[in-house]
Amino acid sequence: MQRRAAIVAITALSVSALGACAGAPQPKNSKSSSGYVAGSVNARCTAQEWPQPMPDIKGQAFDPLSKDLMCFNKIEAVAPDGHDVMNDSGSGLGTWTVVSSTPAPGARVRMTTPITIQLRETG
């Protein structure tokens, strides 16, 4: 649950910084805040129809905050040495490319479906 909260918080900051929520209505008498954006992201995710097809992310740069992955809350991203890069401390997520995912692309998944992503280091 802490990882989900951290992902939502980071997503909120990223979305705010990139202006990706420009189309979302803002409260009239409040400044944009990460709490509001995080709530918006969570609301959009829960409002989607579930289950939905697992996206095909093979060959893409690994970004747990991407539109393809941000609604999933049980992601394990496995480096070649077996460690979960989602739990890297201090070094950030690094630069990784997706090799494969389980469930496979197209499989019907829910927000809470455990997803394992095999990675290789990029560059």
Image (spheres, rainbow, N blue to C red):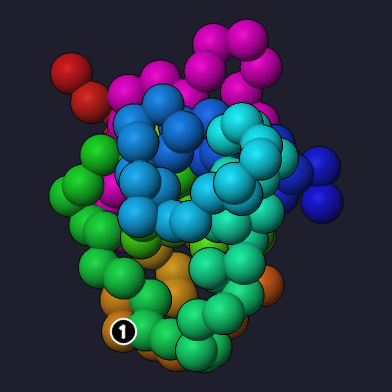
Of 1 and 114, the residue lying toward us: 1
- Residue depicted at x 50% and y 81%: 48
Q: Which residue is mark 1?
A: 106
Of 18 and 53, the residue lying toward us: 18
User: Above or below — where is 27 with respect to 105?
Assistant: above
Task: Name the outermost residue toward the right.
Answer: 1
Q: Position of residue 63 (x, y in %)?
A: 38, 40
115 sits left or right of 79 in the view: right
Picture quadrant where residue 14 is located: top left
Q: Position of residue 58 (x, y in %)?
A: 22, 57
Residue 57 appears anywhere in the view? yes
Indicate the secondary structure of the residue bearing disc 1: loop
In this picture, which residue range is highlighted in magenta? 84-100
50 sits left or right of 6 in the view: left
User: Above or below — where is 119 with respect to 99?
Assistant: above
Picture quadrant where residue 117 is located: bottom left
> Is residue 96 a member of the stretch shown in magenta?
yes
